[in-house]
Amino acid sequence: MSKTLQVVYLTTPLGIAKISGDTFGVQSVVVLEKTSENLNNIPEDLSEPLKNCRKQLKEYFDHKRETFDVKINPQGTSFQKKVWKELQKIPYGKSCSYKEQALKLGDLKSIRAVASANGKNPLWIVIPCHRVIGSNGDLTGYAGGIWRKKWLLEHESKANQLSLF
């Protein structure tokens, strides 16, 4: 198994997704405004986790996927990983507050640490930190920008609405 870090890109409605990882899993998915890299350059030996992540993100944006089953390998503290694992339980089209998330982790006093761990989430969309909002419903804090958080929540809510015509 190769532990060589690989990078692949995907153009999305919100910017360019930069997907990094190796055969052990996807380590990061970040959104960029632009890149000087060739976005169509997909290495022939691209690891399966990166191929799958790229494919599944495309399906997500095409309204063909609501959950991810990508092999991930995020780098962080044990607390951060615990928070990120809890984030993955928030269903598509739903949201929860930072307070609710802290309570699910067993300690209301950890709300600021939970919010900090959300902000350090290395796997944009795959670990859905965009689904965490303020207790009053405000779209607070999002590393990718509040406008992206709003877009993602609307993208997911529109997929759940049935057409009347």
Image: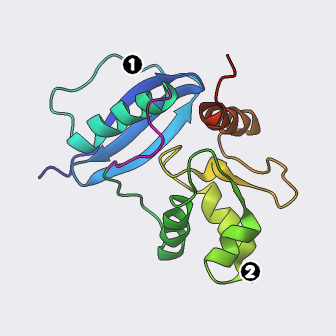
| Residue 6 visible, this orientation | no
In the rendered structure, the answer to whether residue 134 lies left or right of residue 7 reads: right
Query: Which element carries disc 1, helix, strand or loop?
Result: loop
Q: Alpha-carbon neighbours of circle 1 within 10 Å: few (<14), some, or many (≥20)?
A: some
The residue that appears at 24% across and 55% down in the rendered structure is: 24
Q: Alpha-carbon neighbours of circle 2 within 10 Å: few (<14), some, or many (≥20)?
A: some
Residue lying furthest right: 136
Q: Quadrant of residue 9?
A: top left
Residue lying furthest front: 165
Please state the extent of the stretch shown in magenta in the rendering: 63-70
- In this rendered view, identify the residue nearer to me: 94 or 102: 94
Residue beneath disc 1: 39
For residue 108, which numbered disc appears in the image?
2
For residue 28, which numbered disc appears in the image?
none
The residue that appears at 21% across and 40% down in the rendered structure is: 47
| N-terminal-most mark, 1 or 2 | 1
Query: Which element carries disc 2, helix, strand or loop?
Result: helix
